[in-house]
Image (cartoon, rainbow, N blue to C red):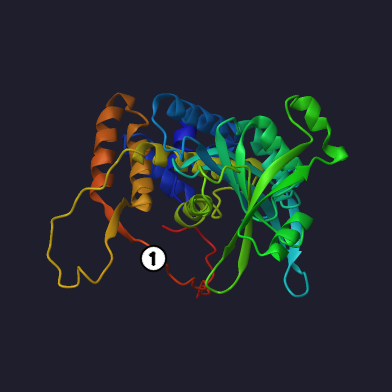
Amino acid sequence: MLIWFILQKTNQSAQVCLESFFNTHHLAAPTKSAFTQSRANLCPKVFKRLNRIIFRIFYQYNKIKTWKGFRVLAVDGSTLQLPGNHKSLRQKFSRHFFGPKADAGHWMSRISYLYDVFNGIVIDAQMESYTTSEATLCKYHMPFVKKGDVVLFDRYYASYELIFTLLGKGAHFVFRMKDNWWKCVETFLESGLDEQVVCLQLPEKHHQLLKKYPHLKTSHKVRLIKKSDRKGDVQVFCTSLIDSNQYSRKSILNLYKQRWGIEEAYKLIKSRLEVADFSGMTCWAVQQDFYAKTLLISICNVLCIDIKPKSPMRRRCKTEKKNPPRKRIINRTYALFQLKEMIRKTTFALDQLKTWLQDFVKKVRSCVEYSRKNQSVPRKTKPLCKYAMAYKQI
């Protein structure tokens, strides 16, 4: 019951959420003190294990979306500011000082996702201290990468150890490279070529990988691809897909664009689910909120994987020929809201789960949004709050 409550809990005050949750089934609501004491005995890893159960069942029984037969994953990290100054935060996280005079101290954490960009599944999530690098968190994701995967990485991730680890696992990769970090990239840029195959040598300090992966060789060929945008900025990508006939330069560049899916996942958990507005101040409470809302993203995307948006009534428009065609997509924010409502209703009535699932599909299918090709919106600066929000919303 505690797990169900945390999953559907909104960012309203704890007592308001408890009243809403239990009064739905005509039960007396416990106090927020009872909720705080109960969650102190719940390990946050339970949400990580539930997430693993979900994606294992999903990959076992569903026909997943792939790219040329490969499962496409992406790795990226971000940061979260933690609330309060509870003593338990010292066990896992670290305090850092910001501002011109470095006098604003905050408890910070670094988070990282291994995300299936085509199917919207969070394969693995990590939440560690702010002092932990994104490259270190990436190593924690590696046990979930398997043969037949293509992993997309942003800058600052590329390293000999990571490249040869992926090759040892039989997985492929696409890295965005830093031109001033790699000698082969600098030479490639000076050559003026659009793509080139180069050979990478495994350094001696990483030869322990040869024992872990006996079939791994000390040298391997990779493919460098150059891209120039309209502003004249040059980007270099490194991939293990060296067959240019089967994997053209354009297809690799288009594949890397799919990495934006993990940015959308962070937008969901930060902006839509407001993960930074934690419901507790202890070390376990902040981890419970983060992993629970990560689990919600996976559940929501699994339920929406086969939902096709309802076709609206056909209307004639004078500007129809001028405007590009629009693609119908479902409203993820509305889908998350309906998922929380379904969890709240079925907590004490699991025998009616099938009925509420059908109702969920019907409502989400009818809530349609539109997306145009090459549509872009300028980034806006966040306006300052007119007043301080010291309390939870009603």
Count of all numbered marks drawn on residues in the image: 1
Specify few, some or many for label 1: CA neighbours under 10 Å numbering under 14, 14-19, or 20 or more. Answer: few
Q: Relative to residue 32, is residue 141 drawn left or right? A: right
Q: Amino acid at mark 1?
A: Gln
Residue 82 can be seen in this image: no
Instruction: Residue at 53% x, 53% y: name it.
Output: 249
Look at the picture and state if 145 lies above or below 136.
above
In the picture provided, is 299 more to the left or to the right than 218? left
Q: Where does label 1 land, which residue? A: 375
Residue 334: percent from left, percent from top = 34, 51
- Report the front residue among 290 and 260: 260
Which residue is painted at 84% across and 41% down in the image?
A: 203
Badge 1 marks a residue whose secondary structure is loop
Query: In which quadrant will I find the N terminus?
Result: top left
Q: Nearer the viewer, residue 33 or 89?
A: 89
Picture quadrant of residue 179: bottom right
Q: Which residue is rendered at x = 72% and y = 57% of the image?
A: 185
Q: Is residue 374 visible?
A: yes
- Where residue 169 appears, x then y in whole percent? 66, 31
Residue 394: image quadrant is bottom left
Q: Position of residue 338 (x, y in %)?
A: 33, 44
Relative image position of residue 9 (x, y in whole percent): 44, 44
Depth order, front residue of 313/181: 181
Query: In this rendering, would 176 be left or right of 357?
Result: right
Where 142 sits versus 20, above or below?
above
